[in-house]
Amino acid sequence: MDQQPSTSVIIVVKNGAPHIGRQLDALARQVDAPTFEVIISDNGSTDGTRDVVHRWAAEQRPAFELRVVDAGAKPGISFAKNTAARVAKGSVFAFCDSDDEVSERWVSIAHSSITPTVDAVGGRAVVAEGSGRDQLPEGLWSFGYLPFALGGSFAVSREAYFDIGGFDESLPPYGFEDVDVSWRIQEAGYALAYEHDLWITFIPTPRSRVVRKEFLSSKARVALAQRHPHFVDRPYSLGYCVRDLATHAALLPIRLLRPRHSRIREVKWLVDSAGRLAGYWHYYTLKRDSLPVLLREPQLGEAI
């Protein structure tokens, strides 16, 4: 494929063999799309994900260029996204998740939404039918500071992405990397917008992974408070985090006698408290990962 792609679709995957084909099928059905490439950034899969992707490409012969890059040197979504961005050819980077499904005009809208006055755009997620989960709210999201876009339906200009340093690789997995990059885009003076028609079918995280995801997200929330001084979340201190965890742990046996939906919420609060204490200890007490790890644009002729 000789034509230079205008858009680079970047998909991070780890052990996605059971579902990666569904997302690739959705990309193969794109309507009115510009010339685009798809980069699968493999963050250490051990289940034959790459073989699945190569078989899919051989059988489907898609109209787009499909590449798999090795991002297994360091665990984490941010590192994997930056690894793919370093080799991406497009002027627009469009990010989606391996276990979701983009709508049929997703690439077209991701590309056309980036304009001289809009540097990054977030879309919406429609929860898959039969998942038993509530629908997600529309629009850019916020919790106490600047709005942010969902990382599973997000596009940004190449220029803005490299200027801000891409995703922060020091954040943990499930580390609010989409929140952080959205905030840094706006803090640098770039415009972030919402596009209703940029939508995906969202497949909720399996319940077997929810506890770990909740813990790591809460840990990362403390990192956001450290990195963005204007983000007023709560007065993090060692005393506050210890008391908060102790309170939720002491009340949990009583709260577990409540109806099921309340029990789930109470366990979530306990996990959140543990994550915040771990985050405070990691970022404030031990002062690990005290600075973000950012990307720079590769220079012409530089080895990647």
Image: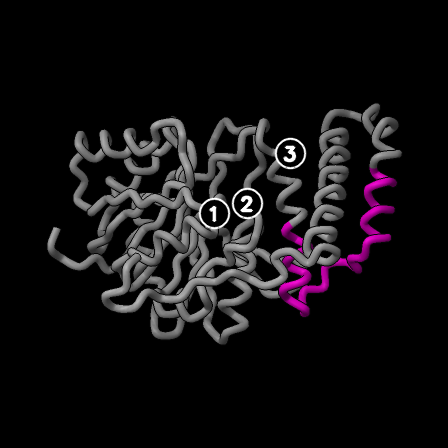
Q: Relative to 77, does residue 186 appear above or below in the rendering?
A: below
Give me the disc on residue 211. Answer: 3
| Residue range (magenta) | 220-248
Is residue 56 shown left or right of residue 237? left
User: How busy is the neighbourhood of tag 2: few (under 14 within 10 Å), some, or many (20 plus)?
Assistant: some
- Residue at position x 39%, y 51% from top? 95
Give the Cα distance between marks 3 and 1. 18 Å
| Secondary structure of the residue carrying numbered label 2 | loop
Is residue 275 shown left or right of residue 46? right
| Secondary structure of the residue carrying numbered label 1 | helix
Is residue 64 shown left or right of residue 157? left
Quarter of the image for the C terminus: give it: bottom left
Q: Relative to 244, does residue 293 appear above or below in the rendering?
A: below
Q: Are marks 2 and 1 in contact (CB under 8 Å)?
A: yes
Q: What percent of the width, then of the height, locates residue 283? A: 68, 56
Q: Amino acid at mark 2?
A: Pro
Magenta segment includes 233: yes
Q: Main secondary structure of the magenta part?
A: helix
Q: Which residue is mark 1?
A: 77
Disc with the residue nearer the chain's start (3 vs 2): 2
- Residue extending farthest left: 2
Disc with the residue nearer the chain's start (3 vs 1): 1
Disc with the residue nearer the chain's start (2 vs 1): 1
Q: Amino acid at mark 3?
A: Val
Magenta segment includes 102: no
- Residue at position x 20%, y 46% from top? 64
